[in-house]
Image (cartoon, rainbow, N blue to C red):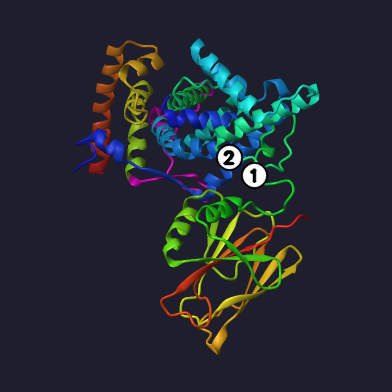
Amino acid sequence: MKPADNIEEFFRNASISTNPKADETILDRLIMVREEAIDTKPAFTKPNIWRILMNGVKNRKVKVAIAVIVLVVFLGLVPFNGTTAFGRIADEVTTTMARLKAMVLGEELGETEHVERQIDKTVTIRTKSSVYSSPDISSLEDFLSKRNIGFVPEGSGNAKYAVICPDEVAALQEFLQSSEGFNIVAASTVLAYAGQEAMIKIVDTAGAGTGAAISAVQDENSRLKLDFAFHNGQDGCDISEIELARGEALLISGIRIGQNASSDELMTVLVLPEVTQN
Amino acid sequence: MIPEDKLLILKFKLGSKDALGQIFEKYKNDLLKLAVALAGDVHCAEDVVQDVFVSFVRSAARIGLRGSLKSYLITSVVNRIRNLKRDLQRHETLSIDGRDCIANDLERPEQWAILSEELKLLSKAMAQIPYEQREVIALYMQGDMTFRQIANVQNASIKTIQGRYRYGLDKLRSKLNSTVRK
């Protein structure tokens, strides 16, 4: 078909794509422009959720409804007592608005987060905690606890282990893939640093000898080292050491727990190094 | 505005970088294709679209939640290209054959837009038809605008827009035919 035969179809099919590196550069620039625009504006002109919600709504009844909802949220979150000082109320209002904003953005506001009075400084409204230097994997811990997967304190060092049965692995993998903020890495030699995006390192030791397990965890600077020990002298896995940053997780599949476990009972072990304060 | 765009705008206004990234990803290709079709030059088009996004980011506070985000961005592209055309005419830097921008095949290593062969062909042909007709065709086919909306943009009657579309399409067809014959 010549292009002129069906111009409309030709027009629609004439495609365009972009250079990914250039995309990244341009997006970084846009983010910088946005941050400059926020920083240079006076506080009262900065994005304010109340103003955004109210100005975006024309219908008076809807405006009243929004105001009632905010009031209910506020009353639900702030315990009133007769001696509440004005300063505390102001702080609670700030916190409530921050929570509301976090709810709109679909983010969780950590309890240890310090919320600044100017809540439109958006950089503080993230789950990257000001207390810990490592990324937040509390959503992973919540997921496990909801499925009654308990942690076993094992080994010497700051780590806890959870044994994931074969019928629960699929759900865990689906959770990891669908959750935002987890960077799944399937290599054993990747080093990570505190403050990096939440990482789950996946190691498949299928074919390793019976009784392969993590035996020791050591703390070294801001990284933890996990040493693997393989029982019965059979070592089908060439990974002997993995370094993790605090708060990162390691998922090891293909492990037989205990020397007498059958070959059908290959478990997955999740290792969560303890997160400690700086 | 479609609900997804409304939520993106709200998140963006609240400072979400992810929302900005999603808006950028969602509309960059469409805007680039429109700009290439209008400007006839990929480098002009890249500059225009980047300027549109920068301007969008800077004016986040003023963007309402009621209008269409796509229309806002498309109108920005159209206005910028019109300004560019006006500046080019003012400085009398028309290229050969009366085209406003020479359709540029040269690729730079840092080039952002990657055009298919069809789009290169199309943009060269579009560059050879009068600008008003080019604009109507591009807004109708790439901007997904109705003739009524385009009439508002060009401040003309719907019949005039329909006429520009019909004549523009005829000229485009003959340009593409002659290109293919070569």
Res B141 → quadrant = top left
Q: Is residue A38 above or below residue A183?
A: above
Q: Is residue B66 left or right of residue A191?
A: left
Q: Is residue B48 left or right of residue B117?
A: right
Q: Are marks 1 and 2 on the same chain?
A: yes
Q: CA distance from mark 1 to mark 2?
A: 7 Å
Pinpoint residue A131: horizontal percent, then vertical percent.
Answer: 74, 48
Tag 2's secondary structure?
loop
Question: Contact, CB < 8 Å: mark 1 with mark 2?
Answer: yes
Q: Chain of mark 1?
A: A
Taking the magenta stretch, the answer to whether it contains residue B96 is yes
Q: Give the residues in magenta.
A: B89-117
Res B10 → quadrant = top right
Q: Give the amino acid at mark 2.
A: Glu
The number of numbered discs placed on residues in the rendered structure image is 2
Q: From the image, tell me which residue sits under label 1.
A: A127
Judging depth in this view, the residue of B157 and A250 nearest the camera is: A250
Res B155 → quadrant = top left
Judging depth in this view, the residue of B21 and A276 nearest the camera is: A276
Q: Give the amino acid at mark 1.
A: Thr
Q: Is residue A182 visible?
A: no
Q: Which residue shows up at 36% across the image and 36% down it?
A: B123
Q: Which residue shows up at 55% across the image and 40% down it?
A: B18
Which SS does the magenta portion mostly show? Answer: loop
Q: What crowding class fits label 1: few (fewer than 14 Cα within 10 Å), some (14-19), or many (20 or more)? A: some
Q: Earlier in the sequence, mark 1 or mark 2?
A: 2
Q: Quadrant of the N terminus of chain B?
A: top left
Q: From the image, tell me which residue sits under label 2.
A: A107
Q: Is residue A127 above or below residue A252?
A: above
Judging depth in this view, the residue of A83 and B27 nearest the camera is: A83
Q: Is residue A251 left or right of residue A223?
A: left
Q: What crowding class fits label 2: few (fewer than 14 Cα within 10 Å), some (14-19), or many (20 or more)? A: some
